[in-house]
Amino acid sequence: MGRRNKSIIFENIEVIDAGAKGKTVAKAPDGRIIFLTNTVPGDIVDIKTGKKRKAYFEGTAIKFHTYSKKRVEPVCEHFEHCGGCKWQFMGYEHQLAYKEKEVINNLTRIGHLNLPEATPILGCENIYFYRNKMEFSFSNSRWLTLDEINSEENIDNRNACGFHISGMWDKILDIDKCHLQEDPSNQIRNFIKNYGIKNGLEFYNPREQSGLLRTIMLRISSTGEIMVVIQFFKEEKEKRLGLLKAIFKEFPQITSLQYVINSKGNDTLYDQDIILFEGRDHIFEEMEGLKFKIGPKSFYQTNSAQAYELYKITRNFAQLTGNEVVYDFYTGTGTIAQFVAKKAKKVIGVESVPEAIEDAKLNAQLNNINNVEFYAGDMKDVFNNKFIKKHGKPDVIITDPPRDGMHKNVVAKIIEIAPKRIVYVSCNSATQARDLALMKEQYNIIKTQAVDMFPQTHHVENVVLLELK
C-alpha cells in the first residue's frame, strides 16, 4: 500500500493568478505551484495541502489574512456548497480578464503561435439568469452541511431537488433559488419538489436505484416558451398523472410538458422514448428571424443571447460575399450553417449525431433555406476526397468542435485542400491551440476574440480567423 500524502501548512501565501479549470494559483516557499479552489487572486492565506505531486501541490485556504480587492459578495445562498458557479465571488470584470488571459496563454504557450493584437473579450450583458436549459436531480438522501451534521437536530426530511455535489455522484444539494435560469424556473422546480413531498412521491435513491422522481429538465427559450420534462424511474400511473396535471394547472403557460420512464442505471435521455403530456413536443428559439425547433434531445447553445453574439462574430470573421462554398464542421443542429447561409453560395454541414442532423434539416425547411445540406457521420470518415468532389472545394471552413478539438486526420485534410479562410470556434482554447499549431506553416492568424458564454464560471469560447498564406 502506498503512503498517504502528508498535509503541509504554508502560512501567509499570496494567491497570484487564476489557472485552468477555474483553480487559482499560489507558490510555495520552494517555488512549487499550489492549485487552490476557494481563493481569489490577491488573497493572502494560510494553505493546507492535499495532493502532492513532483511539480505542484493541491491545497485549500484554511485562514484568510487579507481578502483580495477582486472579491465580491456572492449573490447565491448556495455558493459555498454548489460547484456550478465557482467564480461567483470574483468581480465580473476580473473574471473576463482571467478568461482572456487563459486563451492568449494557451495559444502562445501550447501552440507557439504568433498572434495579432487580440480583440477584447466579449462579456455578457446578463451575468445571471442567462441559461436556457437546466437539469435538476432528485434524491431521498440530500447532502448535509457540516453544521447540520454537527447539530443535534433530528432531520426528518432528506428529500432534495438540485445539483450533484462535485465529486459525489450520489449526493444532491437541495436548491431553493438558482441564479442561472430566469423565472419561472425556480418556481416550477420548487413546486414539483414540494408537491412530491406533500403527496408522498418517492425521491430517487441512486445507490439503491429506487424511487419515483428522478430528474427535471427545464428549457426556457428566448421567445418565452417553456419546456418541462420529468423523468420517472418507474411507472406509477396514478402518481404520475397527479403530478403532471398539477404542474400544468399551476403553470398553464408551459408550452411543452413531457415525461419519460427510465429504469436504466444512468439518467441520460438520448436513448429513451419521451412522451408528450400537454402542449407541443417542442419549443422554438429565434435568432435574426430564423426559427429553430428545439425538442428534449436537441442541442442548442445554452446561452441564447450570447450565442447570437458568438455567431455574429463567426459570420463577420468568415467575410462572406455570397459566392463562397462553406463547410460547417461539427454543425450540431445547423444553427451556424443557417445563420451564415444568406451570405454564402451554399453551406455543407457535418455532424456525428444523427438526431442533430435531422433537427438541422427540419429547421432549414422551417426557415425556407435552400442552400444548405446536412450530413451525419464521424468527421474523420466523412471528410474525404469523394465528399469534396461531390460538394466542391470549400472557400471557407467554419469549425466548432467539441472540447477534444479536431481529429488529426481532419486537420491534415484541411491543410491538404487549403481553403482560403478558416474560422475556428472553440470551447477549449488548449485543444484549439494544438490544432492551430499544426496549421501555422500554411495559415496566418488574422484575428482572435474570446467570448464569455458562461459568467460566474471559468469556461470561455474563442474564435480565431485563419487565412491561407
Image (cartoon, grey):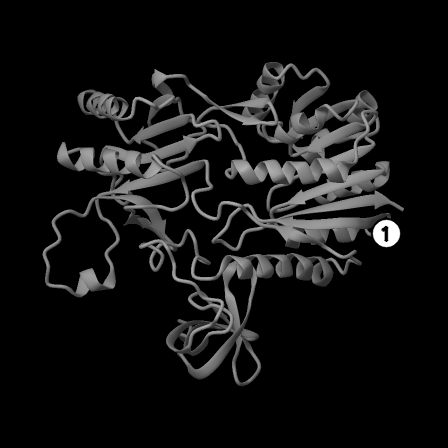
Question: Looking at the picture, does residue 44 appear above or below residue 149?
Answer: below
Q: Quadrant of residue 371?
A: top right
Q: Position of residue 50 (x, y in %)?
A: 42, 72
Q: Extreme right residue here?
A: 469
Q: In the rendered image, which quarter contains the N terminus?
A: bottom left
| Relative horizontal placement of residue 173, taking residue 422 as reference (left or right) | left
What residue is shown with label 1? 441
Q: Position of residue 435 (x, y in %)?
A: 72, 49
Tell me what residue is drawn at x 80 percent, y 50 percent.
Answer: 445
Q: Nearer the viewer, residue 172 or 183?
A: 183
Q: Extreme front residue here?
A: 125
Question: Looking at the picture, does residue 378 appear above or below residue 85?
Answer: above
Crowd band around label 1 with a 10 angstrom C-alpha radius: few (<14), some (14–19), many (20+): few
| Relative horizontal placement of residue 333, taking residue 182 as reference (left or right) | right
Q: Position of residue 434 (x, y in %)?
A: 71, 53
Q: Nearer the viewer, residue 97 or 149?
A: 97
Tell me what residue is drawn at x 19 percent, y 60 percent.
Answer: 148
Q: Position of residue 337 (x, y in %)?
A: 67, 28
Tell me what residue is drawn at x 43 percent, y 53 percent.
Answer: 85
How many dots with numbers?
A: 1
Could you tell me the amino acid type at mark 1? Glu
Question: Looking at the picture, does residue 438 appear above or below residue 257?
Answer: below
Q: Is residue 262 visible?
A: no
| Secondary-structure class at tag 1 | loop
Q: Is residue 380 visible?
A: yes
| Relative horizontal placement of residue 227, taking residue 174 as reference (left or right) | right
Q: Nearer the viewer, residue 403 or 55?
A: 403
Tell me what residue is drawn at x 48 percent, y 48 percent.
Answer: 127
| Relative horizontal placement of residue 266, taking residue 331 as reference (left or right) | left
